[in-house]
Amino acid sequence: MSLQEELRHRMPPRPCLSVVVPCYNERLTIKTTLDKVLTSPFTQEVIVVDDGSTDGTKEILEGIVDPKLKVLLQPRNQGKGAALRRGFAEATAPFVIVQDADLEYDPDEYGKLLGPLVDDKADVVFGSRFLGEAPHRVLYFWHSIGNKFLTFVSNMTTNLNLTDMETCYKVFRREVIQSIKIEEDRFGFEPEITAKLAKGNWRIYEVGISYWGRTYDEGKKIGWKDGVRALYCILRYSPLADKARSSH
């Protein structure tokens, strides 16, 4: 029986996901996150890329023993994009998902995200924090405005109608993500990959997800400078920019 039939008939699903976890100074949440990811019935392998943590995260990772877990250590802090680039290259499962290590996104929703992929309707699925009725922690107004603004500008340049370009939860067919060269080292990964998916004419779906956001006191790292970089990346990698460069 195929994975698609298993999901439809609510049978125990077979493992089919490479879960790539970029991680930097997440000692308070990394073990709980990995416990949830490793026990998901969809998880085939977990690839943690520790991005030069200095808070004891590496020591916690050393104490977690599981045959599905692979830990890669960056020699120094290079950023989320650099960690994902390394993790994607190591993935071997049919589908690849990005999982942050901070518990803002819930691994219990993997099945929902995989639906359009196993139905062969999508090549990529974005988990949108702004669709549906799933719970969302109420946090920063200007962050939500910034996310929606960046998604709006991204959509203008890609001709997509996404609601949440900046979401962490993106699930790819492995051959799709491994065919794309990731150039951004930090949070510019999100607009870069969105633009390159649009240029590749891949089938993109969105699924509504819950969001358990955290405050800066709880360890949130992204800031206004990353928003400025994201805007630059939207313009740099957009199909419109490619057309402008080719016309000169």
Image (spheres, helix red, strand yellow):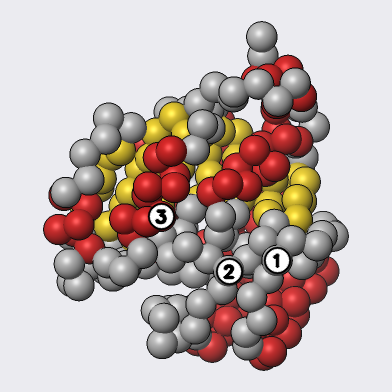
Q: Residue at x 20, y 72 (%)?
A: 55
Is the residue marked by circle 1 packed among few (<14), some (14-19), or many (20+) residues within 10 Å? few
**Above or below, comparing residue 228 to residue 86 in the picture:** below
Q: Residue at x 58, y 46 (%)?
A: 108
Of callouts 2 and 3, which one flags the residue occurring earlier in the amino acid sequence?
3
State if disc 3 and disc 1 touch (CB < 8 Å): no
Q: Amino acid at mark 2?
A: Trp
Residue 129 appears in view: no
Snapshot quadrant of residue 51: bottom left
Residue placed under numbered mark 1 in the picture: 135
Relative image position of residue 212 (x, y in whole percent): 58, 69
Residue placed under numbered mark 2 in the picture: 212
- Most distant residue in the top direction: 1
State if disc 2 and disc 1 touch (CB < 8 Å): yes
**Above or below, comparing residue 150 to residue 203 in the picture:** below
The answer to which of 48 and 217 lies nearer the viewer is: 217
Is the residue marked by circle 3 packed among few (<14), some (14-19), or many (20+) residues within 10 Å? many
Q: Amino acid at mark 3?
A: Thr
Quarter of the figure with the C terminus: bottom right
* C-alpha distance separating marks 1 and 2: 8 Å
Q: Residue at x 56, y 73 (%)?
A: 213
Residue 230 appears in view: yes
Q: Amino acid at mark 1?
A: Pro
Of callouts 1 and 2, which one flags the residue occurring earlier in the amino acid sequence?
1
Residue 33's disc number: 3
